[in-house]
Amino acid sequence: MIALSLALIALPLQTADTTAPSAAVESPYTIRSGALELGGTVTVPRDATGRVPVVLIIAGSGPTDRNGNSLMGIRPNSYAQLAWRLAEHGIASLRYDKRGMPGTNGTFDMSKMTLDDFAADARAAAESLARDTWFPASFLGYSEGSSLALIAARAGPPVTAVISVTGLGRPLSVVMREQLARQFDSATLLRYDTAMAQYLRGEPPKDVPPQLGPLFVPINLSFMRSLSSFDPPAAIRVVRQPVLIVQGGRDLQVTVADAERLHAAKPDAQLLIVPLANHVLKRTRSRIGY
């Protein structure tokens, strides 16, 4: 049923709808993860009676809020739209702000953060839903959130399933370089390779191409190291829950090959390719986009 719902909701949305449909009822929700409080939104089908299936939406990379919008100005509203479409198909959801976003309270040291810390937030959200008598949640991780879902699902219940949407199937370093190769010449790429190797060793990177400077922020070193060492196929192989892998056929950031690598690592997973969808499952007429 989740697979059918995702197939139905992925393509029709080209614009960033900002208003919940009449079929969805939304309310605020607070997640306590260690010393942090993360703000979230629960979306429930209006005609729901009793407990209904619930999907926990885990955000992708960067400073992203619960609705899928970035502090950097990119506002597709994709997570909110996904929650609304799920509600129209009888499925509840919880989406939440990543730690460090305006919807969070509490302090933490970003220089020490790794993938495991963000995965712990997802785990805390699932456990909170279970305590609040919701139906045990399925994880739905977008992009980097797919990796977080795989990590957080290892401990088993109350997580009942994992849905990887446009998730990495290769090490981040490989995918990043592939993305950069479409934008920069070979000389710039060589400078990037040298600088990234220095950065991950903890050395001040030298001769960083100015346009790539944001990739080498010192405070992000621990997190980048954890991303670079994360092996998605190895992680999905040990997940015991049912897994659904969803990939847009016109995604420029993560490719169908990534989804196929994940599926090869876990053959009993269901693989769903949405041919006309981009990285945020929006319909696109060409491969120009994201």
Image (cartoon, rainbow, N blue to C red):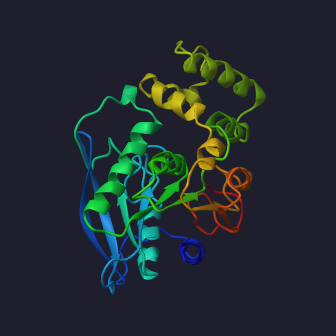
Q: Nearer the viewer, residue 186 or 160?
A: 160
Q: Which residue shows up at 38% across the image and 68% down it?
A: 93
185 left or right, relative to 169: right
Total residue callouts: 0
Give how far across and how far down residue 241 sits, in percent: 53, 59
Q: Nearer the viewer, residue 104 or 36?
A: 36
**Is 52 rendered above or below residue 78?**
below
Quadrant for the N terminus, please: bottom right
Quadrant for the C terminus, please: bottom right
**Is 47 rendered above or below residue 215?**
below
Q: Which residue shows up at 71% across the image and 59% down it?
A: 287
Give how far across and how far down residue 250 sits, in percent: 69, 60
Give how far across and how far down residue 68 sits, in percent: 43, 57
The quarter of the picture where residue 192 lies is: top right
Q: Nearer the viewer, residue 211 or 50?
A: 50
168 left or right, relative to 178: left
> Does residue 4 show up?
yes
Q: Nearer the viewer, residue 260 or 276?
A: 260
Q: Which residue shows up at 60% across the image and 55% down it?
A: 166
> Does residue 68 show up?
no
The quarter of the picture where residue 276 lies is: bottom right
266 left or right, relative to 10: right
Give how far across and how far down residue 271 sits, in percent: 68, 64
212 left or right, relative to 149: right
